[in-house]
Image (cartoon, rainbow, N blue to C red):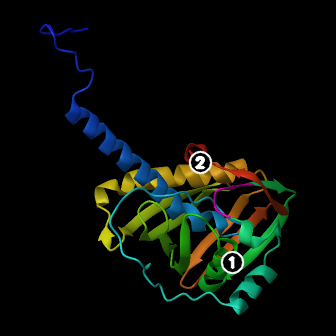
Amino acid sequence: MRIENNPAGEAPASVPLKEKKEKKKKRRWIKWLIILAIIIGLPVAVIGATGVYNIPVVSQIFGTNKPIDLGIKASPEALASALAGNPVTIKGDPAEYSGVRNKKYSGKVDVDVTYTSEEVTSFLQHFLQNAPHIRDLQVKYIEGGLELSTFVKTYIKAPVYAKVYVTRTSNKSVDINLEKVKVGRIPVPERYYSQIEEIAEKAVNNQMNEIEAFTIDTLEFHDGYAVRKGTLPKTVELLPGEKQLDEFL
């Protein structure tokens, strides 16, 4: 170890101020990438109507006050259709659900479902109506993937938009390929895409593996609708408390 001589009367500086600022800035970007990746993974996990996935917060970045409109409107009719086709019993008041709430999964049920963009958007808005960190979520299915748009209410207070392609790789894993991400109206630099994809895949796949009854036999995304075959928990029940960010990775 190298030790510098210290002039008399001067206290040694353990870490230069510039280095501290650089480390702080790096931590901020790492946290932002992790949160953004988890948000991108949201619709993948709920494609089979498992209930509600986990959506934490994002750190400080510029934005506007409205999410990008994908043209997908939630409606009572679309919600009723989604609930009628949902084989999972979701216990608890929808107003008390949020992405980070702890949940208990029990039983197993076979699923063979097709959901439209309007149905999944209505379903998610219903069960995330009082979510602490996001609002106005829209999901638009496209060939091979999906677009999502939402408003992050905490920290950045800005919209997030993503266009992502998703491929099933096993009965409990997916591969995520990111085409475009915006925070506010500012595109995220493409050099961060591989990091976001890696973290999103880890977060989503870890969650699917933690839910024993969750399996994917078929996962297809088409223009306006998605197809999901496999198994899901028979019952989803709210538990006290919330998950922390590091529990997703």
The secondary structure that most of the magenta stretch takes on is loop
Residue 49 in sight here: no
Q: CA distance from mark 1 to mark 2?
A: 23 Å
Q: Which residue appears at 31% of the width and 37% of the height?
A: 23
Q: In the rendered view, would you say 86 is above or below 131?
A: below
Most distant residue in the right direction: 107
Q: Position of residue 174 (x, y in %)?
A: 57, 58
Reading the image, the residue beneath label 1 is 126
Most distant residue in the front direction: 9
Query: Who is closer to the viewer here, 40 or 145?
Result: 40
Residue contact between numbered discs 1 and 2, judged by CB atoms under 8 Å: no
Q: Amino acid at mark 1?
A: His
Q: Position of residue 15 (x, y in %)?
A: 26, 25
Q: Tell me the crowding category of disc 1: few under 14, some 14 to 19, or many 20 or more residues within 10 angstroms, Cα based.
A: some
The magenta-colored residue range is: 98-102
Query: Who is closer to the viewer here, 143 or 28?
Result: 28
Side of 125 relative to 13 (left or right): right
Query: Who is closer to the viewer here, 122 or 41?
Result: 122
Picture quadrant of residue 85: bottom right
Residue 56 in sight here: yes
Side of 11 relative to 205 (left or right): left
Marks 1 and 2, the one that precedes in the sequence = 1
Q: Amino acid at mark 2?
A: Phe
Reading the image, the residue beneath label 2 is 248
Picture quadrant of residue 47: bottom right
